[in-house]
């Protein structure tokens, strides 16, 4: 084959490389955007759902499977084809794509490849001359121009939308991601559910003089307030008196010694506290 035809083939090979580079760039945008969106969805669902060990394990492996699929399909596959691992598009397929962009050369480019196929092992000088002439006419055409990397900018919205959402949630309520991620990563470990409310001690000091009474003040906050609050100490559980919608009180009578206690409401316990004498 003539030098002009070899140049044509080199240009087709350059187009094929750029074709897979473009697929890799586009796939990177899509896969990263979808992974961010999946991370937001899975961690948020777990944070509010507080699933059991089985539920968290299912969510974890669903996310892992989705991650492997996205990276494999959108990143690994085009990257491997870029380095000619596996089946890649051939020159005829590349010519079809180029022809869709440069209408004026489509038939001529495909025709050259067809003539080359007929000329294999042939000494027909007229046929070889025709291939050389058509290859020369196609020489000025920038095949790689059929692919524009800048067109991928329109796909960036699929990355920016979940990225902005991720940043927004991280600022407003970072626990959704930190707690949700921790629960998913430790999917095979039992983790106690998080209470939808908080029980806090209202007293500035948890100390009392010996043989004196101590009035414990408890404040409850959150979106789902419990109907009753209890205190557990000395192996027994006692109800607190409700002083208003969010406040409770309990009186330790005639305190003789230090007493450890914790608060309980709707199946949730507070941290351990110590009343000192």
Image (cartoon, rainbow, N blue to C red):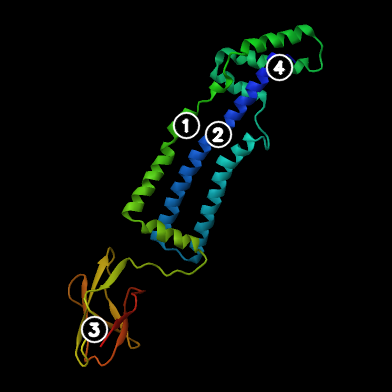
Q: Residues within 10 Å of mark 3 (few under 14, many from 20)?
A: few
Secondary structure at numbered mark 3: loop
Q: Whole-percent x and y of residue 262? A: 32, 79
State the quadrant of the N terminus.
top right
Residue for point 33% across, 65% down = 196
Disc 1 designates what residue? Answer: 152
Q: Say which label, 4 or 3, has the lower sequence index.
A: 4
Label count reads 4
Residue 226 showing in the rendered view: no
223 to 69, vertically: above or below = below
The Cα–Cα distance between marks 3 and 1, rounded to whole angstroms, is 66 Å
The image's mark for residue 114 is 4
Q: Are marks 3 and 1 in contact (CB under 8 Å)?
A: no
The Cα–Cα distance between marks 2 and 3, rounded to whole angstroms, is 69 Å
Q: Are marks 1 and 4 in contact (CB under 8 Å)?
A: no
Q: Along the horizontal axis of the image, is 74 left or right of 47?
A: right
Q: Say which label, 2 or 3, has the lower sequence index.
A: 2
Q: Are marks 2 and 3 in contact (CB under 8 Å)?
A: no
Residue for point 63% across, 35% down = 81
The Cα–Cα distance between marks 1 and 4, rounded to whole angstroms, is 33 Å
Q: Say which label, 1 or 4, has the lower sequence index.
A: 4
Disc 3 designates what residue? Answer: 207
Residue for point 60% across, 38% down = 79
Q: Nearer the viewer, mark 2 or mark 3?
A: 3
The Cα–Cα distance between marks 4 and 3, rounded to whole angstroms, is 95 Å
Q: Along the horizontal axis of the image, is 198 left or right of 136?
A: left
Disc 2 designates what residue? Answer: 23
Residue 271 showing in the rendered view: yes
Q: Say which label, 4 or 2, has the lower sequence index.
A: 2
Q: Nearer the viewer, mark 3 or mark 1?
A: 3
128 or 209: nearer the viewer: 209
């Amino acid at each position: 084959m003539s030098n002009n035809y070899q140049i044509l083939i080199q240009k087709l090979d350059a187009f094929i490389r750029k074709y897979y580079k473009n697929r890799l760039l586009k796939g990177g945008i899509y896969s990263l955007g979808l992974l961010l969106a999946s991370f937001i969805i899975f961690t948020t669902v777990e944070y509010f759902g507080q699933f059991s060990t089985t539920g968290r394990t299912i969510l974890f492996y669903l996310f892992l499977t989705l991650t492997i699929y996205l990276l494999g399909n959108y990143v690994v596959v085009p990257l491997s084809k870029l380095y000619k691992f596996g089946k890649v598009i051939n020159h005829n397929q590349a010519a079809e794509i180029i022809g869709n962009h440069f209408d004026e050369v489509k038939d001529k480019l495909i025709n050259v490849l067809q003539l080359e196929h007929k000329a294999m092992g042939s000494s027909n000088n007229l046929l070889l001359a025709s291939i050389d002439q058509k290859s020369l006419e196609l020489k000025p055409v920038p095949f790689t121009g059929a692919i524009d990397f800048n067109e991928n900018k329109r796909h960036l919205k699929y990355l920016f939308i979940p990225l902005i959402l991720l940043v927004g949630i991280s600022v407003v309520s970072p626990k959704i991601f930190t707690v949700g991620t921790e629960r998913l990563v430790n999917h095979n470990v039992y983790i106690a559910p998080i209470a939808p409310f908080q029980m806090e001690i209202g007293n500035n000091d948890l100390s009392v003089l010996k043989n004196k009474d101590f009035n414990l003040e408890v404040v409850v906050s959150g979106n789902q307030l419990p109907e009753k609050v209890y205190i557990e100490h000395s192996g027994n559980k006692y109800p607190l008196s409700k002083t208003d919608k969010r406040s409770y009180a309990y009186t330790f009578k005639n305190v003789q010694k230090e007493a450890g206690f914790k608060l309980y409401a709707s199946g949730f316990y507070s941290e351990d506290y110590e009343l000192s004498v």
